[in-house]
Image (cartoon, rainbow, N blue to C red):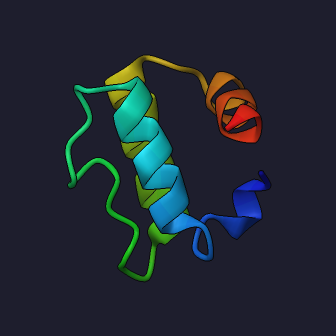
């Protein structure tokens, strides 16, 4: 999955992250505002304790 496709695949990404990481909230996975990608990636990095590179790899493996 490409990071540029987060907007188009938002529901799919949310579902997969919720399955794997039960500590994530709807707010952490929010991607319905103008800053979808940046906001969601920043929240995921904070909650999961991942570097940008680690998160990128994780999303690509979904």
Q: Is residue 31 left or right of residue 13?
A: left
Which quadrant of the view contains residue 39?
A: bottom left
Q: Position of residue 27 (x, y in %)?
A: 21, 54
| Residue found 63% across the figure and 31% down from its top | 52
User: Total number of numbered labels?
Assistant: 0
In this orientation, which residue lies closer to the viewer: 1 or 37? 1
**Which residue is farthest top?**
49
| Residue found 53% across the figure and 58% down from its top | 12
In this orientation, which residue lies closer to the viewer: 62 or 3? 62
Q: Position of residue 9 (x, y in %)?
A: 60, 67
**Which residue is farthest bottom?**
34
In this orientation, which residue lies closer to the viewer: 12 or 5? 12
Q: Position of residue 34 (x, y in %)?
A: 43, 82
In this orientation, which residue lies closer to the viewer: 53 or 11? 11
Q: Is residue 46 left or right of residue 8?
A: left
| Residue found 46% across the figure and 31% down from its top | 45
């Amino acid at each position: 999955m490409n990071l540029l496709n987060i907007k188009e695949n938002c529901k799919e990404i949310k579902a997969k992250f919720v399955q794997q990481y039960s500590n994530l909230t709807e707010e952490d996975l929010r991607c319905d505002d103008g800053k979808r990608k940046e906001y969601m990636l920043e929240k995921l990095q904070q909650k999961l304790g991942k570097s940008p590179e680690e998160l990128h790899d994780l999303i690509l493996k979904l």
